[in-house]
Image (tube, grey):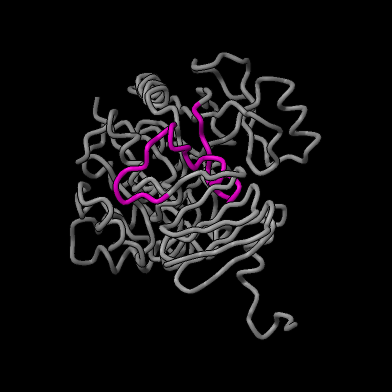
Amino acid sequence: MNTHVVIMAGGVGSRLWPVSTPEKPKQFIDLLGIGKTLIQMTLERFSPVCELSNFWVVTSEAYVDIVREQLPQIPKSHILAEPEPRNTAPCIAYACWKIHAESPGANIVVTPADALVINVQKFAAAIRKALNFTEGTNNIVTVGIEPSRPETGYGYIQAEERKPDEIVKVMEFKEKPDIETAKAYLSAGNYFWNAGIFVWSCKTIISELRTHAPQIAGIMDRIAASFGTWKEKETLDELFPTCEKISIDYAVMEKSKDIHVIASDLGWSDLGSFSSIKEHIPMPEEDPVPDGGAAKAIEGDNKVIGQDIRLFGCERCLIHAEDARTVVVSGLKDYIVAVKDGNVLVCPISEEQMIKEYSAIHPDKTKKV
């Protein structure tokens, strides 16, 4: 099978400041202290279903050098730089038009760069099943995650029926719900978290974009005419920013008739919060930390990442201080302490939804005590 994998790696990870910053966002960081960054783990996760020469990364121009450094296995010509972020539909379109120019019969998987999957063998089996289902057809498959709790931070996929690890028709995509709606979804059993992973043939997605997002498709045709010429970057820089700023969910997935889902318990997380990082830092007996890693669990249900972390009377805290020399914390319960590049965050875990706002406040506007 002619499989290509597209890794979307342009996000800025603002909910994890100061560990994740616009200069080096979370996909390029070893968030779990295991010696691998999230984008490296993503490449590793898909390597059983795709040759390394068929991987692509779409990222910001500012991150191209980081991608090259962390993923030297990927051809340099397959690292695509967006002139500016325009959400996932233009990002995916750009990659798929590029793949079509190189291999029009390709079957494609699109994935975010910054998620965690624990059950990697089960995940690879699901992706293989989806690829077999989409090859030579007009079908599109998205990956659903069995919900473990009534989560309000994810979008949901409503399937026609509940058949774990099987491909079933999608009835509807649902926006992030309130807590009562999320509880109803969990009880119903046929609602799954939307992981943002898509499988389709190259011809199918281009056809769907022509039908449902003609403005984007028209721009991609004009950009594609310059592929391989000295005008390519100039044309991309001029035209890509004129694409409609829209997600692939709105542009295609909610409009197409041939959408299916394969849902499973994959141990998936988007690692979009410090509490999710704390949950997934491995215990020493679960997953010994490789050389270069610095994560561990210590007494009091505390999790720490760093070389010299000293806790006294702390409970249920996360200390994320990989590049700090020594960090001493005393008497905190249910707190996040994060240190990176001279910036320090001390915040109750219960208030972590405010971190994005805290990090955006101008110093002149903060209260001085």
- Please state which of residues 67 and 29 is positioned toward the viewer in this rendering: 29
In the image, is 174 to the left or to the right of 122?
Answer: right
Q: Which residues are magenta?
A: 266-294
Asked whether 175 falls inside the magenta stretch, the response is no
- Residue at the spot x=71%, y=57% of the render? 351
- Quadrant of the drawing holding the N terminus: top left
Residue ranking furthest to the right: 180
- Residue at the spot x=77%, y=27% of the render? 184
- Quadrant of the drawing holding the C terminus: bottom right
Asked whether 272 falls inside the magenta stretch, the response is yes
Q: Where is residue 4 drawn, in percent x and y?
A: 29, 36
Q: Where is residue 332 drawn, in percent x and y?
A: 67, 57
In the image, is 31 to the left or to the right of 311?
Answer: left
- Please state which of residues 10 and 347 is positioned toward the viewer in this rendering: 347
Seen in the picture, residue 125 relative to 322 is either above or below; the reply is above
Q: Main secondary structure of the magenta part?
A: loop
Seen in the picture, residue 73 relative to 68 is either above or below; the reply is above
Seen in the picture, residue 369 relative to 301 is either above or below; the reply is below
Asked where in the image residue 24 lies, by quadrant, the reply is bottom left
Seen in the picture, residue 124 relative to 35 is either above or below; the reply is above
Q: How many marks?
A: 0
Q: Where is residue 140 drawn, in percent x and y?
A: 46, 28
One can see residue 339 in this view:
yes
- Residue at the spot x=56%, y=46% of the render? 278
- Please state which of residues 75 and 241 is positioned toward the viewer in this rendering: 75
In the image, is 269 to the left or to the right of 81?
Answer: right
One can see residue 217 in this view:
no
- Residue at the spot x=37%, y=26% of the render? 124
